Image (cartoon, rainbow, N blue to C red):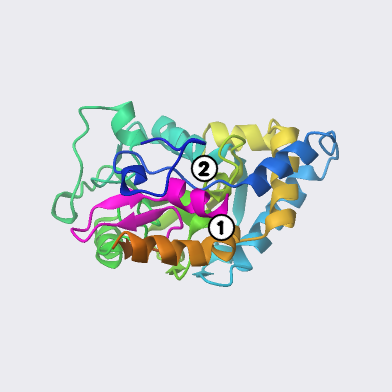
Amino acid sequence: MRDNVTREYTKEWLQTDRPQPMYSNKINEFYDNFYKENPVHTADLDSIFKETFVNWLKNHQYSKFKGVDVFKRLDIINGCTQYIDDLYQRCGSLQTFENDYKYHYRLNPNITYTTIDTLDPNKELLISMPFPYYGDVHPEMTEILNTCYKLKIPVHIDGAWISCIRDIEFDFDHPAIQTFGISLSKGGLGGNRIGVRFARNTPLGAVTIMNDFNMNSQALVSMGIKFMETFGPEYFWKTYNEEYKKVITDFQLLPTKSIHLAKTAAGKPVGIRPLLRFLKK
């Protein structure tokens, strides 16, 4: 069930089909105030955004990320979906695991998912961290990365959910990982997607061209800066932590590390955004 203002605090409002990322009235207020001002027109805007973004990532209190500084090439992306589109354009095809971002299926309804045993040395791998089905790191992530390194498969990390998690530690400096993308979308900027792609080396392709020729939207970049300065990292967990615990208890669910996601006793993911927002109304 999609979230809307008629939500009720009942199990019928658990989202079993398409869990929605969190949102709040405070972010609506942020939009109202931001649009009263023009974007900051400055030659250093992109650099300011990247520096702010790296600091935002490192300032997470509940989660820890290592190896970020190894990736010297930083490019602005219009959310992780642009990062993914760029990968498909550059690589021709990718291999992904079942229950990853549904976008892969929407692009190709006939998709064949890979497994650890069927990893193809001739295709690059894209995998989400956190993984959407688990709301956490994929339970076989270490084995997946080690197998890819052994088979010389370049790995790319979709970090779209990093802006809505807690209690995750991850080292990006595994030798198999070549790039990773993180955006602010799941942190509340879903309608104004903006983020950063981190790369060991400079990739060819549209994202690189967009950045080299200063073609990024100043409105989105300046909004991203202001958003990070206003809310900081882990805003939703700091705001809805007690409500999350209540929903888990009241509906006999299992917690995940992503604020808008829980699990049934059978391990099936369910979205709890409507219930969280109901409690905060």
Is residue 11 on the magenta stretch?
no
Q: Earlier in the sequence, mark 1 or mark 2?
A: 2
Q: Which residues are magenta?
A: 258-281
Q: Which of the 4 image quarters holds residue 19? A: top left
- Note whether residue 200 is visible: no
Quadrant containing the N terminus is: top left
Looking at the image, which residue is at 44% across and 54% down? Answer: 178
Indicate the position of residue 32 as horizontal and vertical percent values: 75, 37
Looking at the image, which residue is at 35% across and 62% down?
A: 250
Q: Which mark is residue 222?
A: none
- The residue lying toward the viewer, choosing from 204 and 252, is 252
Quadrant in the rendering for residue 134: bottom left
- Pinpoint residue 242: horizontal percent, then vertical percent: 50, 67
Q: Secondary structure at mark 1?
A: helix
Q: Is residue 220 left or right of 195 when viewed as pictured?
A: right
**Above or below, 217 relative to 199:** above
- Secondary structure of residue under mark 2: loop
Q: Are marks 1 and 2 in contact (CB under 8 Å)?
A: no
The answer to if 278 sits in the magenta stretch is yes
Q: Any mark on residue 203, and which?
A: 2
Of 147 and 30, nearer the camera is 30
The amino acid marked with disc number 2 is Pro
Instruction: Name which residue type carries label 1.
Output: Phe
Q: CA distance from mark 1 to mark 2?
A: 33 Å
- Looking at this view, name the residue that lies furthest to the left: 117
Residue, disc 1: 236
Nearer-the-camera pick, 125 or 191: 191
The residue located at (33%, 27%) in the rendering is 107
